[in-house]
Amino acid sequence: MTIDYIDKAAQWFCTIIAVLMVCLLLSLFVFIAKESLPIWLTEGVITIIAGSSWAPLTTPPRIGILTMFLSTLWASCGAMAIAVPLGICCAVFLSEFAPLWASFAIRTTLRVLTGIPSVVYGFLGASVVIPWYEKIVGLSSGESLFCASLVLSIMVVPYIVAGTYTALQAIPDEYRETGYSLGVSPVHVTCRILLPIARRNMVSSISLAFGRAAGETMAVLMLAGNTLTLPFSWFSKGEPLSALIALEIGSADVGSPHYQGIFAAGLLLLLLTSVISFAINYTNIRGRQP
Amino acid sequence: MMRKCLIMLCAVLLAVAVTGCSTQTSKTEQQTKDYSIKLGGSSTLSPVMAKCADDFTEKYKSWKKVQDTFPDEAITIFVATGGSGFGVKSAINSSVDMGLVAREVTSAEKEKLSNHKLYTLGYDALTIAVHPQNPIVKVKPNMTTAEIKKVFAGEIKTWDQLDPALPKRPIVIAIRDLGGGANQAFDEAVMKATPISQEALQLPSMGALAGKVQENIDAIGYVSFGFVNQNKGKIATLSVDGVEPTVDNIVSGAYKISRPLIVIAKSQPDERQQEFMKYLLSEQGVKTLADMGFIPAKR
């Protein structure tokens, strides 16, 4: 009788906490949408998203965040393009081919890498990566979305490695033993048999990594150059949405079009990461169906 | 049944959360319990404030030593950066006790600060700074305001367009972000509403701007006079319209690109804050300000 009561109470308690978490996320959306609503209504959704001129302090204020949106896409997709192949190959090596001591050492190092604050990465990038890039390419100023992507990929690789490694370790040894006993080469076993099985967990760790890369603020603030020109290539300078918010929120008067424009950028960033995460996870789950 | 309950619970919690977000919570008067002083604002002024706060804390250690009537509490002074705009905004909504502003406070902002108290600690000039190894230092150490305006507006894109004796390398313009105090002061003195080039690099703080000019040979930026003095030999400055950025020229007003360094409080500061302000305006505070390269206001 008593145990039944405790059981029910525990169940309800967990349900309430879970519901609270969902409400927290939804209220975040609602708050940001509310703060930026006036500017969406005044300027119109298309003008803001497709507009390329950002001059919120002129009269009338020009709020166009296309530059920032493209910069975020370049920086985060570029980072993923570098980090995903690196991460998957590293995880495959750690799981299948590395001796135990090497695997342990490298995994510990990667775990430490996740703990390093992003401002330290930004600082290192600004003092090491950018002068190196300037020297190699011969440019007068090395800030670019490419350098931001480089540093972002270093920040994001540990997540991909950890997720893929766990996914590969979870596959029972029978698969490998069967493959080897039939004379299949280790590489073929890994690529054609193990990776497709591990695909679900791999993809969810990649979506987590993308969320981190798109939302990263301090590293891109110091590395992307923060210019207002449209970034037509990976190697041009830009100003990702997160850098825009960090740079300008301090000086915007509460309630002014400038403030609302910054919240609009925040809403766009939130929607971008949410939609991509959701889309990746949805196709992931659906892909399971044979 | 369970599902309906769940949905209703969700809706109720969401409603509660949203109303919670929108009501303005009044700031509880914590003066009787919380003795810390919070300052925040300009990234140019905050290093000076931090040093003064350190010196003040070192000297007195406890409020009781400052004045006998104060309680025996340890002195804690927090200094934050965020830009002059942030300093004014935080002073208005009372998230700091006193805001640090490195530009003139506009009348619109003064209106929002009902009976404010404004202290001008001194003056800072914005120098047109380049890397010391930039050939312009030898070839053309003086620029007219019109030329500076053209360079920063992006009309003159390479060094050789400015002067044929300079190399054909692109000019890298470094500015503070649009809301920064330095940008507004520069706009009033030089740009006069002409927009700065879209390709200018926006740096998040004056320290970062000084760093950019120090490390990049093609960079030009408006670096605070104080930061130039703190990095003697690593930053070269150009004179503007024949006037060099020296202490005498800035004090006399001959050097036009200058801005006041202001500490602003929303209402009359309480006794502890007044004691700290007295320290700032006293000989030691003035000396710290001058040591860091700024120009103290004449008492």
Image (cartoon, helix red, strand yellow):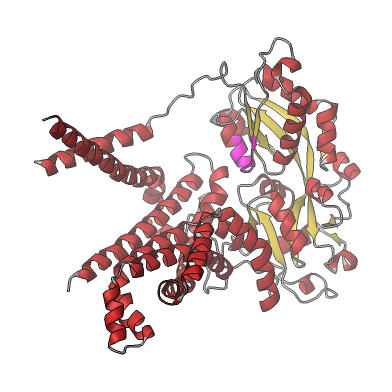
The residue positioned 83% from the left and 75% from the top of the image is B164
Q: Quadrant of the N terminus of chain B?
A: top left
- The segment highlighted magenta reads B79-88
Kindly give the residue lying farthest to the bottom in the view shown. A183
Q: Quadrant of the C terminus of chain B?
A: top right
Percent of width and height locating residue A42: 39, 49
In reply to whether residue B86 is colored magenta, the answer given is yes
User: Left or right: where does residue A148 sit relative to residue A198?
Assistant: right
Kindly give the residue lying farthest to the left in the view shown. B1
In reply to whether residue A229 is colored magenta, the answer given is no
User: Left or right: where does residue A93 sit relative to residue B136?
Assistant: left
Snapshot quadrant of residue B272: top right
Percent of width and height locating residue A40: 38, 51
Above or below, comparing residue B90 to residue A159 in the picture: above
Snapshot quadrant of residue B289: top right
Percent of width and height locating residue B223: 76, 52
Above or below, comparing residue B18 to residue B129 in the picture: above
Is residue A131 at least partly visible in the picture?
A: yes
Above or below, comparing residue B25 to residue A46 in the picture: above
Percent of width and height locating residue A92: 41, 74
Q: State the residue in front, A90 or B294.
A: A90
Q: State the residue in front, B125 or B219.
A: B219
Is residue A50 at least partly visible in the picture?
A: no
Q: State the residue in front, A130 or A203.
A: A203
